[in-house]
Amino acid sequence: MLQEQFYKVYTKFKLHFYQNVFEKWQDREASLTTVETFCMEIIYYLGKPTINEFAKMANISSPNAAYKVNNLIKKGYIKKVQSQEDKREYHLEVTEKYKNYYNISYDYVNVVMERIKERFSEDELKTLEKILSVMSDELMSEIE
């Protein structure tokens, strides 16, 4: 039962995101492919990774990662920024264009979080926060 409920919540977040993406791009072709959307989520999650760090997390070759990154740069979703410490190294930064796209997903998370705060007691909220923290920090060790 718990697994079913978790799956339902996870799926509803995804479906809400997809609905909004389709609604937003209804009158024009979407500018990100599905694979590019996944790449952007990885880059955003990693927070200014190098191409090699992105390649490692995505389990793809460095040349393949470089190809994907160059396409995303051309579309205006990321930019390369030279490292201040090592001038040979470049970090990938998401642009405002992507942040606006990405906020489609997080706006709904914020709505649901406000509803949770209204619905549950402080003790229940602390328990939920602890459970989510343990899930993220301990039980999902495959993702750094």
Image: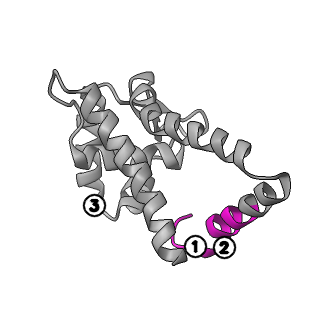
> Alpha carbon of mark 2 to alpha carbon of mark 1: how far?
6 Å
Residue 139 within the segment the image draws in magenta: yes
For disc 1, the marked residue is: 141
Q: Nearer the viewer, residue 53 or 89?
A: 53
Instruction: Tell me the number on the disc at residue 138.
Output: 2
> Alpha carbon of mark 3 to alpha carbon of mark 2: how far?
28 Å
In the displayed orientation, state which residue is furthest to the bottom. Answer: 1
Query: Amino acid type of disc 3?
Result: Ser
- Magenta stretch? 130-144
* Disc 3: CA contacts within 10 A as few (<14), some (14-19) or many (>=20): some
Q: Is residue 137 left or right of residue 3?
A: right
Q: Residue at x 72, y 44 (%)?
A: 117
Task: Tell me the quarter of the image containing the C terminus.
Answer: bottom right
Q: Mark 3 or mark 1: which is in front?
A: 1
For disc 3, the marked residue is: 61
Measuring from the top left, give residue 74's x and y in whole percent.
24, 27
Q: Residue at x 41, y 46 (%)?
A: 41
Measuring from the top left, give residue 92's x and y in whole percent.
44, 38
Check disc 3 and report its element: helix, strand or loop.
Answer: loop
The quadrant holding residue 134 is bottom right
Q: Nearer the viewer, residue 45 or 111?
A: 111
- What's the magenta bit mostly, secondary-structure-wise? helix
* Disc 2: CA contacts within 10 A as few (<14), some (14-19) or many (>=20): few
Q: Are marks 2 and 1 in contact (CB under 8 Å)?
A: yes
Measuring from the top left, give residue 50's x and y in whole percent.
45, 46
Q: Residue at x 59, y 37 (%)?
A: 110
Instruction: Tell me the number on the disc at residue 89.
Output: none
First of labels 3, 1 by sequence position: 3
Query: Amino acid type of disc 2?
Result: Glu
In the displayed orientation, state which residue is furthest to the right. Answer: 123
Residue 22 within the segment the image draws in magenta: no
